[in-house]
Image (cartoon, grey):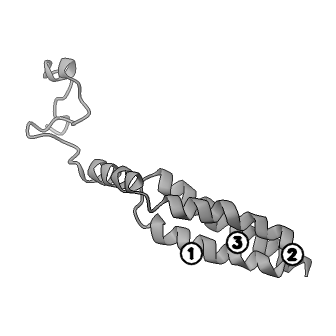
């Protein structure tokens, strides 16, 4: 019984933590994952009524993932992930204007 309680607690914490981490990193699939994490947290019913308190923050977090503001956040992260790492001149897109002014900074070292 003790191992079951520990396993359920670890499963609930892992599911909620993994969804929170990936939502922070802008992964759109965490919306569905939040619902799954809430369903996993329903396993706390097997423990005792006080353990069901863990379901409330997970339900709130899963609900917040569906807000329009979060959708814009996910879209912004998607844009960042799909941006080309180099511009048309072959220079890194993270290069500032001052570093673009000097060709010495970004010479092709393969020549």
Left or right position of 25 against 59? left
Residue that label 2 marks:
48
Q: How far apart are marks 2 and 1 (CA)?
A: 21 Å
Quarter of the rendering containing residue 1? bottom right
Disc number placed over residue 36 in the picture, else none: 1
Q: Which of 30 and 103 is in front in this view?
A: 30
Left or right position of 19 against 40? left
- Would you place residue 40 above or below residue 31 in this image? below
- How packed is label 3: few (under 14 Cα within 10 Å), some, or many (20 or more)? some
Q: Nearer the viewer, mark 2 or mark 1?
A: 2
Quarter of the rendering containing residue 13? bottom right
Identity of the residue drawn at 51% across and 58% down: 64
Contact between labelled residues 3 and 2, with CB atoms less than 8 Å apart: no
Q: What element carries label 2?
A: loop
Q: Distance between the residues labelled 2 and 3?
A: 16 Å
- Would you place residue 5 above or below residue 84 in this image? below
Disc number placed over residue 11 in the picture, else none: 3
Quadrant of the frame with the C terminus: top left
Q: Which of 57 and 21 is in front in this view?
A: 57
Q: N-terminal of the two: label 2 or label 3?
A: 3
Q: N-terminal of the two: label 2 or label 1?
A: 1
> Where is residue 17 shown, x and y percent of the image?
62, 59
Q: How far apart are marks 3 and 1 (CA)?
A: 12 Å
């Amino acid at each position: 019984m003790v191992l079951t309680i520990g396993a359920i607690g670890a499963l609930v914490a892992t599911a909620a933590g993994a969804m929170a981490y990936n939502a922070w990193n802008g992964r759109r699939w965490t919306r569905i994952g939040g619902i799954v994490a809430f369903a996993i947290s329903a396993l706390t019913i097997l423990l005792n009524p006080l353990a069901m308190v863990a379901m409330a923050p997970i339900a709130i977090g899963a609900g917040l993932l569906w807000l329009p503001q979060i959708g814009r956040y996910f879209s912004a992260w998607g844009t960042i992930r799909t941006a080309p790492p180099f511009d048309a001149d072959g220079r890194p897109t993270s290069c500032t204007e001052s570093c673009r002014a000097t060709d010495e900074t970004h010479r092709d070292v393969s020549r």
